[in-house]
Image: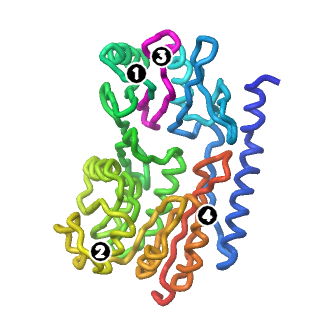
């Protein structure tokens, strides 16, 4: 059996549904401790869904190869195909590798390659080296950039060479409206664009009946992925994010989408909790009057570790909680506290990462006495 046949067999439609059912069943079993809730399931495309990828470059027998590491093994294994990669990634992999092998300047001490692509046709390739990058490298890389019609960045220790730009711009249709997103090379972006559109649509529907005279607090806003869509349902949004790169990108995305009712501030969830509690002042909030906000809803999309106890207490103050999680286990842990004060009214599962054990989930909760 050829390697292609083996891949085709592994990534079959039948196998896809089986792995998705297993993940959803595990989540449903964990959720059952709080009640019997229907789960709205959003399956992914089994193939060609991933819009970003990173590969090790392995030099062997005088040639460079794409490679990946298996857990517990030091030597990577060479890969010749990437069926889960988006169309632009799979189309670029072969010609890029051919160009790398055709140029000693490009290939010498090349350590890894990162792809960032969009559904709207833009591609960014980052070449990462164990050597300083000089003008000779840049001249050669500019030829490669034109040849492949991509944006190229070169990185090495304490060095970054941007030939044209270090971002791509994605377009996503949600509720009949097109939203545009700047996605920066070093910032976090959702890797599965079709599932991201489903997540945005679901989150928007949860907030569609909200009082538009009320405000939203969003923690961990990233590049404003959810913020720009949720803005239509609230009078104002206060969004927080700890990453400087993501804050800058979020502000760009608010401008790209002509949205002016969002204030974003660089604070961690612990810091915004301290600020709202009045425990300490922050210079970054000196021009923001927190008492002027009339919050009805809080939206959280935390890291895999979930909400810490202080943020749990903060979130429980709000009448409505919209929680998107990349880790069902920590979500369940947080729900153990949140369900003391709130009822679950909507649950969804999004297969953001097919062929892995990871499952993105969403829960919408309403305060028990709000009715």
Q: Position of residue 250 (x, y in %)?
A: 32, 52
Q: Earlier in the sequence, mark 1 or mark 2?
A: 1
Q: What is the CA distance from the residue labelled 3 to the residue labelled 4?
A: 43 Å
Which residue appears at 50% of the width and 51% of the height?
196
- Are circles 1 and 3 on residues that touch, CB within 8 Å? no
- The answer to which quarter of the image holds residue 292 is bottom left
- Residue at label 4? 328
Q: Report the front residue among 176 and 122.
A: 122
Residue 24: x %, y % from top left: 69, 60
Q: Which residues are magenta?
A: 99-127
Q: Is residue 292 magenta?
A: no
Q: Name the secondary structure under disc 4.
A: helix
**Residue 264 numbered mark, or none:** none
* Residue position for label 1: 149
In the rendered image, the residue lying farthest to the left is 287
Q: Quadrant of residue 39?
A: bottom right
Residue drawn at (46%, 37%) of the image: 119
Distance, label 2 to label 4, CA atoms, is 29 Å
Choose between 274 and 220: the one closer to the eye: 274
- Residue ID at (77%, 27%): 5
């Amino acid at each position: 059996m050829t390697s292609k046949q083996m891949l085709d067999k592994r990534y079959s439609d039948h196998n896809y549904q089986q792995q998705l059912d297993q993940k959803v069943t595990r989540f449903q079993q964990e959720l059952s401790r709080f009640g019997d809730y229907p789960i709205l399931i959003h399956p992914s495309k089994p193939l060609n869904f991933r819009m970003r990828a990173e590969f090790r470059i392995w030099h062997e027998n005088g040639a460079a190869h794409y490679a990946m590491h298996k857990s517990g093994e030091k030597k990577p294994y060479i890969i010749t195909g990437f069926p889960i990669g988006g169309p632009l990634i799979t189309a670029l992999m072969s010609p890029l590798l051919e160009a790398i092998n055709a140029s000693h300047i490009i290939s010498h001490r090349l350590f890894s390659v990162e792809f960032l692509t969009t559904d709207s046709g833009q591609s960014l390739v980052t070449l990462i080296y164990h050597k300083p990058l000089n003008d000779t490298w840049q001249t050669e890389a500019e030829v490669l950039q034109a040849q492949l019609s991509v944006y190229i960045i070169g990185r090495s220790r304490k060095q970054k060479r941007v030939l044209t730009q270090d971002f791509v711009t994605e377009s996503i249709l949600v509720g009949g409206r097109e939203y545009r997103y700047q996605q920066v090379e070093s910032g976090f972006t959702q890797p599965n664009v079709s599932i991201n559109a489903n997540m945005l649509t679901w989150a928007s529907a949860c907030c569609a009946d909200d009082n538009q005279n009320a405000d939203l607090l969003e923690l961990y806003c990233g590049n404003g992925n959810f913020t720009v869509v949720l803005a239509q349902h609230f009078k104002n949004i206060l969004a927080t994010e700890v990453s400087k790169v993501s804050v800058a990108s979020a502000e760009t995305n608010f401008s790209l989408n002509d949205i002016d009712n969002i204030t974003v501030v660089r604070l961690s969830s612990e810091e915004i909790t301290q600020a709202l509690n009045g425990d300490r002042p922050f210079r970054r909030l000196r021009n923001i009057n927190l008492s002027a906000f009339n919050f009805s809803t809080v939206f959280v999309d935390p890291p895999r570790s979930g909400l810490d106890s202080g943020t749990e207490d903060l979130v429980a103050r709000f009448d409505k909680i919209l929680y998107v999680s990349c880790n069902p286990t920590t979500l369940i842990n947080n729900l153990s506290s949140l369900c003391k004060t709130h009822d679950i009214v909507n649950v969804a599962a999004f297969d953001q990462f097919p062929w892995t054990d990871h499952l993105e989930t969403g829960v919408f909760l309403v305060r028990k006495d709000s009715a």
